[in-house]
Image (cartoon, rainbow, N blue to C red):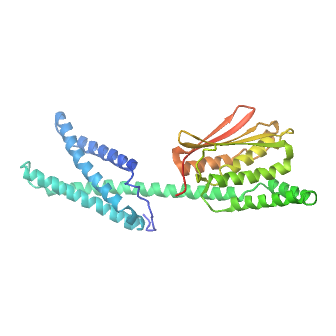
Amino acid sequence: MPSTPATGFLPDFCSPRATFLLVLIAQLLAMLLALAQSGPLQEFWPRLALISLFVQWIALATALLLCIGRRWLQRLGTAAATTVTLSLMLGVCAGVSLTAAWLGALAEIGPLDLGFVLRNLLITVIVGGVALRYFYVQHQWRQNVAAEARAREQALKARIRPHFLFNSLNAIASLTRSRPAAAEAMVEDLAEIFRGTLASRDRVTLEDEIELTRRYLNIESARLGPRLRVEWRLDPKLPQGLRVPSLILQPLAENAVYHGIEPAAAGGTVVIAASLANGRLTLSVGNPKSAGDAKRAGNRLAQENIRERLALAYGENGRMQIEDDGRNYRVTLQLPLETRA
């Protein structure tokens, strides 16, 4: 393993999920060790019970120490964290093994067997080394996925369709003389859009994301006129300070205008909704389908970017659903509630 700073390649052993997985893995190891020993079949279950008790004590004691020293371990490099963790595992294994051997000798089950202790230490080195290697590879994989997602997010933030920019500038130029106040408001909206899309924030408040989307739709409304109608369905009971990944709503609104409104001669209505359902935040953007949409390039690539970022940010708790009945198109996002720390 490289010795670059790891900063957290070990899982959080303070969490119930990590503890449950550790107990499960330890039990599987105990079953393998019990099956590997020869003896009458009727002795298998008592043997499994003793081995399970022994292995679980080592696993849980190690998890407790790693939980206590988690913050300190995160400041170590990869090699140092690996060495310390493996040393803790060996220390716990040696302590539990010596205790078990001493109790066996005290109960006159057999003499104090140092070979028993050495075998357990060897098993701990092998199993612990494999586990730490797995944790490190998982950590590297998560870092690579996160880096790729950040790169795609930055590409999304830097990407403003040239047609949108040029059309906005043309609309501003046309309004400068006839409606200077409207032109000034449009310039302010365009500046805020650039500021929001170029900001390096992973999380924003829902209010900020909605405001960015409003400004974008203000510009498009000034350009498209009555062809673009916007309907906001915002739940007034939404808590203040809800946090969401940046740029998850505005790109969907942009897709709705680009694919649903612009190709239609009569235009249509973009419906944007935000509500709470079953303790989760639900966001949706809907638009009418247009026959001219099939001729347009792009095919909603921003949606895949948003889907991947939701998976990275929330795992299985972040969901994206697309509904297309041939006449209407709607994208719905479901996110866990996340407030400002």
Quadrant for the N terminus in the image: bottom left
Q: Residue furthest right?
A: 178
On the image, the x and y values in percent for residue 32 come to: 28, 43
On the image, the x and y values in percent for residue 280 come to: 55, 43
- Residue drawn at x 21%, y 37% as measured from the top left: 45
On the image, the x and y values in percent for residue 33 come to: 25, 45
- Residue drawn at x 72%, y 51% as measured from the top left: 213
When the figure is inspected, residue 112 is found, relative to residue 80, above or below; the finding is: above
Q: Is residue 294 left or right of residue 74?
A: right
- Residue drawn at x 82%, y 39% as measured from the top left: 292
Looking at the image, which is closer to me, 284 or 114?
284
Looking at the image, which is closer to me, 77 or 239?
239
Q: Is residue 54 left or right of residue 28?
A: left
Looking at the image, which is closer to me, 260 or 36?
260
Q: Is residue 278 left or right of residue 12?
A: right
State which quadrant residue 86 falls in: bottom left
On the image, the x and y values in percent for residue 96 come to: 20, 55
- Residue drawn at x 16%, y 52% as measured from the top left: 100
Report how many numbered discs are placed on residues in the image. 0
Q: Residue furthest left?
A: 108
State which quadrant residue 262 falls in: top right
